[in-house]
Image (cartoon, rainbow, N blue to C red):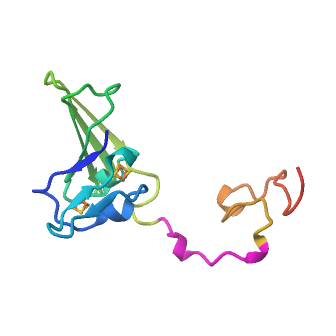
Amino acid sequence: MPTFVYMGRCDGCGECVNICPSDIMHIDPVYRRAFNVEPNFCWECYSCVKACPQHAIDVRGYADFNPLGHSVRVHRDTELATVFWKIRYRDGRQKEFQFPIRTTPWGSIQSPADYAPPDMSTLGSPLLAHEPEALKVDRLPGLPASGATP
Ligand code: SF4
Ligand code: SF4
């Protein structure tokens, strides 16, 4: 149940292209508007919906939470740091929800390019990038030492 774009609202800014983890939001080279190039590969993660400044993207939701004929609108309010959901059922009923966006300010998360390049000597380590500091468990015992067998 993928995303689709209201062409009349889209201004071609590309925010949805940048954020889509499935790399399926593209800008049409002729009309300069976004569209979903492979609906079957949409994760329904709503990242593009929340990121779109024009509120131009909609999603046809799963039938288990929304029967056919519905609409799901998502509005990200950066001032209030909330995401507002409005679900309209085909019988006319509406449900509205509002949640905090996140616990960190919008845009404050470091991109991978902001970190130092990985050290090749750590290739044999069982730790992933930014571990153990990112796990916030560096003071706890029990993390395997680099190269140790469990
Ligand atoms: Fe990409 Fe997620 Fe938007 Fe689908 S809902 S187009 S996977 S960002
Ligand atoms: Fe269009 Fe919204 Fe995508 Fe920008 S983020 S290109 S306005 S659909």
Residue 112 included in the magenta stretch of the image: yes
Q: Position of residue 74 (x, y in %)?
A: 26, 45
Q: Position of residue 61 (x, y in %)?
A: 30, 35
Query: In front: 59, or 92?
Result: 59
Q: Position of residue 84 (x, y in %)?
A: 27, 43
Query: In front: 80, or 119?
Result: 119
Q: Is residue 122 left or right of residue 96?
A: right
Q: Hey, which quadrant is residue 30 in on the image?
A: bottom left
Compared with 95, 85 (above or below) is below
Question: Residue lying furthest right in this view?
Answer: 149
Q: Hey, which quadrant is residue 145 in on the image?
A: bottom right
Q: Which residues are magenta?
A: 109-121
Residue 95 included in the magenta stretch of the image: no
Residue at 33% across / 32% down in the picture? 62
Residue at 28% across / 67% down in the picture? 14
Residue at 53% across / 76% down in the picture? 114
Q: Is residue 87 left or right of residue 110?
A: left
Q: Position of residue 101 (x, y in %)?
A: 38, 50
